[in-house]
Image (tube, rainbow, N blue to C red):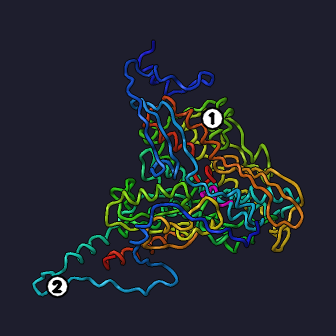
Amino acid sequence: MATETDTRHEQQGGVPAEAGPPEIETIGEGLETEELILNLGPQHPSTHGVLRLVLKLNGEMVVDCVPVVGYLHRGLEKIFEWRTYQQGPRYADQADYVSAMLNEHAYCGAAEAIAGVEVPRRAEFLRVIVDELSRSASHCIWLGTYGLDVGATTPFLWCMRDREYILDILEEICGSRMNHNYYRPGGLLYDFPQGVLGKIERFLDGWEKSIDRDYREILEGNEIFLERTVGIGVIPKEVAVQYGLTGPMARGSGVDWDLRRDRPYSIYPELKTLKPVVFSEGDAFARYQVRVNEMKLSIALIREAIDKLPAGPVRSRQGHVWKCPRGEAYYTVEGAKGEVGFYMISSGGSNPDPFRAKMRGPSFMNLQILPWLLKGRLIADLVAILGSIDIVLGDVDR
Amino acid sequence: MAVDQKPPARPIHFEISDALKQRPTTTQTGLGAPDYVAPTPGAIANEDNVVFATVKDLMSWARSRSPWPLGYGLACCAIEMMAASASHHDLARFGAEVFRSSPRQADVMIVAGTVTHKMAPRLRRLYEQMPEPKWVIAMGNCASSGGEFWDSYATLQGVDTVVPVDVYVPGCPPRPEALIEGILRLREKIFRGG
């Protein structure tokens, strides 16, 4: 029989993969209370939107957790069937709305794969630049709101400040702050305007310093932040693979899997600075480190893409109607949260819209591990664990 | 289904008849809005610095200075709502940055995002949990009229079918400046006793 300190330490330190979540009875003998059903959400400040969790509690321990999703289900996949290929990226924006460019990339990639159209080289480089900017904006939002979740307000203000710079750049490029609608099947809507590349470089120079000087110092130098994240929500490598986690969730658990390298698309194979960020601890702090280091990786990738940027057209086929032959394709993009995939079927003929477009939302897949993570944990850790998954409810419900 | 064929409108079954009868007149930002009228204080001061005012005017003045919103983020607009309250746009300049998590402490419900049929009864319940007086801002095209989800089977075609809306803020999503403009319009309306 272990002492209470030992079990508590074991509970925070990690769960062996084969053992599964710890049993409730080991926490404290004779301390069981009557089971309480607590309803968290759908309107709750820390569920990152409209997620609803039905929690079964024993004292302060979570016995069971049932996520109820669908409060933001807007029928996007049905809408894709009614919209032409040019209108589709606008709706793909709405899924993961904090990193909209990556969804557009997956949608257009699937349409191009069916049609077998080569995208101009300059367009691929510009796509990488806006993709990485969009990923940085998403990680900024995550870091800011995660700071709020665990009780720090200042990182939120700093992250939103830097995100405004990114959004200014994206607005100058495509005319919209959030739902960009910049991709088109076969390329991009139009080229970058004059002077944007210099603006991006100036922003990156300042932001690179701000990541180390501001974000990391205020969070990693804070005892409360470390106490609430280190050893909390540990996902072993095997469990991460079993649950199909992707993105920073998998790479925080030591799974060396980055679609930009392992299933190469666009011009990522040509970029020398692409080294996936992997941390093996598997706790919330490791996922924090993955995302912060991915910001710096994005900076390096954007710089290299700007250096190698060729001249040329940005759209392979002009015109108002894009038609695909009969066929199907699955195209994946390494999104800010994980694998963003589009499975698209075209019925061919003169149809200007896809017959079916299934979207794989990384947030939905990553959310599945939440009941496993929460079983036997303290309710105070719930928000820290949920925040570290980085869900966007538009991507969960679609 | 072809793109230009709009499916027939589906009736939405909520018990909202009472609320619809009591709907106040709405103001709208952007096109078609009434001309800007500078708020004139309803108080008269004489030479001895004694202020005469009606209680109603004083209450309206006090209420209009600091409307506390309910933190009710639904979709993309919620991110812009956060951006409006964060460092760059700083909603605190207008006294509306205190996002309450409980409807019992809120004055203004900013419906930021797409309202689905599954969410609509919860929205109505949150509205009823807010204490009087209360106001509603419909932020974004989805909340205002259904927006780009006009033919979706799952979304509500405008939040004004469920709760009475005071200010509509168009945009997809509206810029933070547009939300601030909407809050200022609401302040005018509250000041005039709305």
Disc 1: host chain: A
Disc 2: host chain: B
Give x and y (percent) for residue B69.
39, 62
Q: Element type at marker 2?
A: strand
Give x and y (percent) for residue A373.
55, 33
Which quadrant does the C terminus of chain A fall into?
A: bottom right
Magenta segment boundaries in residue numbering: A92-98
What's under tag 1, amino acid-wise? Answer: Ser
* Residue A341 falls within the magenta-colored stretch: no
Which quadrant does the N terminus of chain A fall into?
A: top left
What's under tag 2, amino acid-wise? Answer: Ala
Give x and y (percent) for residue A247.
66, 44
Mark number displayed over residue B155:
none
Mark number displayed over residue A253:
1
Decide which of B21, A323 is in the foreground and name it. Answer: B21
Give x and y (percent) for residue B45.
16, 84
Q: CA distance from mark 1 to mark 2?
A: 69 Å
Q: Is residue A145 above or below residue B20?
A: above
Mark number displayed over residue B45:
2
A112 left or right, relative to B183: right
Disc 1 crowd, CA 10 A, few/some/many (<14, 14-19, 20+)? many
- Image label count: 2
